[in-house]
Structure formats: structure tokens, C-alpha cells
Image (cartoon, grey):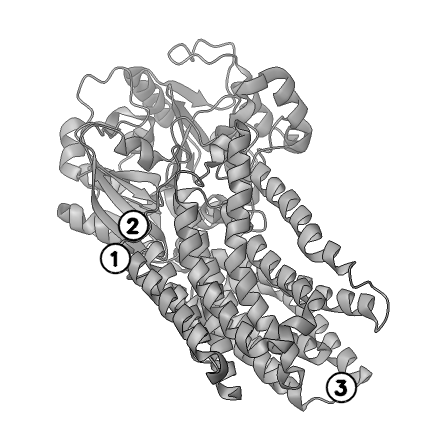
Amino acid sequence: MARKINISIALLSSAIIAFQLVLIQILEFTQWYHFAYMIISIAMLGFGASGTFIAIFRKCLLSNYSFLLPLMMLLSGLSMTIILAISQTDVMKFDTFLLFTSTNEICKLIIVYILFFIPFFFGALAIGMVFSFSPERIGSLYFANMIGSGLGGVIVLVFTMFLFPNQIVIILSFLAILSGIIIIPKKHKLVLSITGITSILVLLFFMIRPTSLNPSLFKSLTKVLDLPGSEIVYNKNSPYGNLQVVKSTLLRFAPGLSLNYKGEAPVTDMVFVNGNWKGPLISPETLKKTEVLDNTSFALAFKIQKPQNLLILNSGTGAHISYGISQNIPNIIAVEPNKMLSEIVENKLPDIKLNLKTFEVNTRSFLVKDTMFYDLILFPDINSFGGNSGINALNEEYLFTKQSFVNAWDRLSPHGMLSITCWFDYPSRYPLRVFSTLIELLKNVEINCPEKHIAGIKSWGTITFIIKRHEINSTDIEKITRFAKDMQFDPLIFPIDINANDHQYNIVQDSSLFKHFNKLLTGKRQDFYNAYLFKVNPTTDNKPYFNQFLKLRSFNYFIENLGNRNAAFIEIGSVFLVFTFIQITILAFLLIILPLFKIGWKGFDKLKTFVYLSGIGMGYMFVEIVLIQKSILYFDQPLFSTAIVLCILLVFSGVGSYYSNNIKLKRKSFITVIGIISLYLLLLSFSINLILNSTIVCNPSMKFLIFIVLIAPPAFFMGMPFPMGI
């Protein structure tokens, strides 16, 4: 029976961790990325509340152990699928943007929060009961728990390559139900078998009629599907998210098009990833025929000089590739880490392969490893028309950090250029952050007169900056001004002469943007960063939140001056994180701390035990979070990073837990183990950036091995304090 229990715990743990990761992907599709924090907090709340429940009802639970243990496992598995279905009904489905306008939406969110809590609570209750019932076997049980949890991350990565998230949840439910079925005792065989069979029949029903995942009303995909005649013609899932291609005769591509353009904006299929617009599938022939991109600010770099070697970073749906081909560029290199995107581009645009080499690798890894030099390096366009209301404030954007721009600069030929286009917003945030990053780049490479290396074009909706390795000469300026005049764009020649009549075509509300540009060119940039309403200083690899602009001290300004129009500036992503923290704090107090007062804090060192075990849990979580954040740049995808870190950390912690059975429980042993963990983590904190930065060029398999070498030793010892404490 002991072996069955171990297998059962491993299966259940795999299902719980995998369910947590799949929920993150589901909410990223139906809502946005920042819900990852909510799911993690829900899972932790489930485990914490189950521990309190066991502490209060320990005698009752253990006296009915043989019946309740498999029952909790069955309920955990069944509730995964049922609760997902309930959360997607019209009655329960909430919308992020409506949380700030309707109390009903807030109530829905809280209810959904509690609903998702249920599978984790039942699963954690089962695991906690096993630990409490057999404390003498805690080492092997914790080993099974951790090994199963680590494999849960691998399961998700494998399943997401073939199945959609709603289908994966059903498989995870089967795993959890199986964990309960294999330990059903003869004494309760009839009742529990009926429960198990009923659970399986429910899952079979959902396999035939799977839960439909509907994205937010405010997602790009939802709006596009409202257009007459629009339809999804391609739908595939992967660890990078759910990719869909939408076809419609009303979908056209014309980003910040010149008002002088007299042609017709081309109709294109559009690509969406997790419900968010990713770009058009537009062929080189179409771009050559319509000249649509020739009439946007994006074309500036090509008007200054025709590149012989073109590097396109995060090439996405291939619009920049198609333009390069339409301009007869001899050598084009495209880097796109999302293999699924590259495949759809090659399948839908077969003529795009001319003069093209595509690399499906981490973009930053490519920039560090590559030895070629390029006449032009294109960064992907930043933000989108209309902005995003701060919904992406918590997204890591390592391609737009200062270090990334330095890496790109190192790959420029002697006369090479960087080009980056962003949408114009007011009050300005994105243009200022891009400009400040370019200025910091030039200062970093010891160029003392940045105004001689940077120029730009401003249309009615976009701003394109170019930055040259050599100084911008009079011929370059002549080409910029001529192109601007032909397109009725405004040239940005720095420092900007604010009194000149150069900005007659696309007049903004005031000249503050140009004044800000001039201030950033001076040596008092830090004073400007401190005084400005938004955070517009360059992002770094340590703080890669390119879309995060909000300053706490600016809240009052927005409320007083903008009233109900302040939603676009308060950054929903950041506000939601605060809301999640408040919510989890209240629920944790109600479900974990408050019930403990029923049994009191005195006697048998209860307070010390609480501090010890909660300290282990908090410390473990902090290490997990830091390692996941560090690995996102390394592996270039949040789901990959999370799964890999969890797998390595949990598996080796499980091995450490198993080994802890051989350690004599003395005070010296505890001090030694804690000391080793502290020393390892201290060394890791000083060395991890250096190691990851120097090995980012390695292939994925080697990176995985490097991460094992880094994480395995501390993880091994981190698996000991909990079973030793029990």
C-alpha cells in the first residue's frame, strides 16, 4: 500500500502543478498575462487553507483517512474540469476592463477566485493528510510529492504542443482521479468506485463537448470577429500560446499611413496570439504593388540608404520581411523565437523565402552569438494604435532593454543603422522611453554628441527613430527632410528647433514632446526622469517592464485632471496586481490565520512551528519567483521558463527530501542544512547574472543542463528542512 500511496501522491502532484500552469495559459487567452500572479496566489492559498483545515480537524480527518483520502483526490480531479466550465459561463465570466466600472464584475472575479481555489484545496488536503498520517515516512512521501510536481511542468509543455488548454484540463482531471482510484480500499470500494466512475463519465461528457474559451470583449480577436464575414481559418496551440489566423474582406493593413497616400490599403489575413493582434500576413508582391509601407514612417531607414544586409528582430508575421524582399534587399536575416509563427508565415507566404534566412532562436541569444554585421537592424513596432491602457504593464520585454540595444549596436556595420517605430501617445510615454533608451545606448558606447547620430520622422500616429553608427551628415538630413515633405511627415532633427515651422503637418496639442526630446539630449536626464509624470527612463534586464510607466505620486494628478478618462494611464496590469495582493491577504487571513485561533497558539511550540514552516514556504516561493524571472530572458518564453524552473527545483528538492531520511534529527543538523542553503543562494545571487549572460548563446539543451548545474545543489538541500521539521 505504501508504494501505491507514493504513486498516487506523485500523480496528484503532477496534476495540480500542471493545472496551475494551464490555468495561467487559459487566463492569458481569455484575459491577459497578469493573471498568472492570481493563479499562483490561488494555488498557494489552497495549500495554506488545507493546512489550517487539517490542524483544526486533524482527529476527524485521520480517523476517516482511508475513505477521505481517495475522495479528496477524486474531488480535486473532478472539480478541475467542472469549475473551468462554470468560470466560462455568461453568469460567471468577468472582464478585466469592466472591473473598474461595475461592482458586478468585481463580485464575479472574487467568486471565480474562490472557485479556482477548490481543486487546489482538495488536492492539497489529500497531500497534507498523507503527511500527517505517516510522518515517519515523510522523506519518501515528500519525495513523491516533489518529483510529481516537477514532472507536472514537463507534462504541460508536452501537451500544449498537441492540445488546447481546455482539453489539457480534462486529461489532468483524469490524472487526479486516477490517483484516487488506485488507492481505493476494499472497505469503501462500492461508494468510492461509484464516485470514481461518475467522475470519469462527467469527464467523458466534457471530452465530447469541451468547454469553450471565450476571450475578453476588449481583446483584438473579439473585436475583429464582430466584423461581417470574418472567420478563423487557422487555429493551433503551443507553449507560446494559442495562434489564430482570421480572414475578412474588411481587414486592411496601413500602419500610420501618410495622408498623401492615394492607393488602396491592402486586405490581409491577420494573426492573433492569445487573442492579441500580432500582425498581418502580407506578401512581398502585395507590398510592392500597393507601396503601402513606402508611405509610412517605417520606411525612413530605407530612404536614407539601401541596406545590403538586413537583420529583422522578432520578425513576427513577416511584414518587415515582405517589405525587405519587395525592396530587393540581397541578404535578409529574420529572427523569430516563436516557431509556430515562423511556420504559419512560411505556409501562408511561400514566396517569402527568397534571399531569406530564418532563425528560430532567442533574439538576445542571436545578437550575442552572431558574428555578421548589418547595414540595418529593424526592431519590431512598439505598442498598437489606440494604446493598451496599461494592460501589458507586467509583461517582460527583454528586446527593448538597454542591454538589448547595446547588443544590436555591436552588430552594426560601419555605416549601419538601427530603426524602431512606435505609436504616438499623449501625454507621451512610448516615444520618450524609446528615445531615452537610444540616448543611453549612445552614452554607453561613449558617443558624446548623441544628437549627431539620431534622427526621426513623426506622422499623425507613429514615430520612427533611426540611429546611425556614423554621424548623420548633410546628405542624410536632406533625404530625411525630402521624404518627410513628400509624405507630409514632420522631420525630427535633433536638437529640435521648437520655433521652426517644421511641424506643420501633424500638429500636436503642444510642443512639450519636442522640449522633452531636447532635455533628454542634455546631461540632466535624471532630473527629467524624476520630474516627469511617467517613468520613461530606459528599462534594463533587471527591470524589463517596458510597458510600465505609472508613478504612484501621479495618481492624484490623473484623478483630479482626467476624472473618468484616466483609465488609459493608471495601468490596469499594475493596479490588478495590487488588487490581487489585497484580495489574497484578506482571504489568507480568513482561511488560514483566523481559524488557527480556534486551536490557540500556546503549547508544543505552535508559534515556533508556524514561523518555521511558513518561513520555509515563503523562502521557497521567493527563490522560485526570482529564478523564473531570471530564466525568462534565458529561455525566451514565460511558460517554458516556469516549467523548467519548477521541474528542476522540485525534482531535486524531492531527491533531497528522500535523502533527509538518513540525517539524524539534531539541532546541529538543522543549522548545517540551513547554513548550506543560505550559502548557496548567496553565491547564486552574485553569480547568476554573469553565468546566464555568458551562456545565453548556448543551444536549448545546453542551457537546460546549465540550469540544472545552477539550481540542483541548492534545490537538493532546500528539500530537507520541511521533512526534517515534520
Classify mark 2: residues with Cα within 10 Å, few (<14), some (14-19) or many (20+): many
Q: CA distance from mark 2 to mark 3?
A: 58 Å
Q: Residue beneath label 3, please?
A: 665
| Label of residue 334 in the image | 2
Mark 1 or 2, nearer chain start: 1
Q: Secondary structure at mark 3?
A: loop
- Horizontally, residue 258 falls left or right of residue 15, namely left
Q: Secondary structure at mark 2?
A: strand
Of tags 1 and 3, the one toward the viewer is 1
Q: Nearer the viewer, residue 63 or 486?
A: 63
Q: Residue beneath label 1, please?
A: 208
Q: Secondary structure at mark 1?
A: helix
Above or below, comparing residue 459 to residue 717 in the picture: above
What residue type is disc 3 on?
Leu
Classify mark 1: residues with Cα within 10 Å, few (<14), some (14-19) or many (20+): few
Q: Position of residue 554 (x, y in %)?
A: 65, 27
Q: CA distance from mark 1 to mark 2?
A: 41 Å
Residue at image x 27%, y 45%?
244
Q: Nearer the viewer, residue 144 or 133?
A: 133
- Horizontally, residue 143 falls left or right of residue 608, namely left
Mark 2 or 3, nearer chain start: 2
Asked whether disc 2 touches disc 3, contact meaning CB atoms under 8 Å apart, the reply is: no
- Horizontally, residue 659 falls left or right of residue 258, namely right
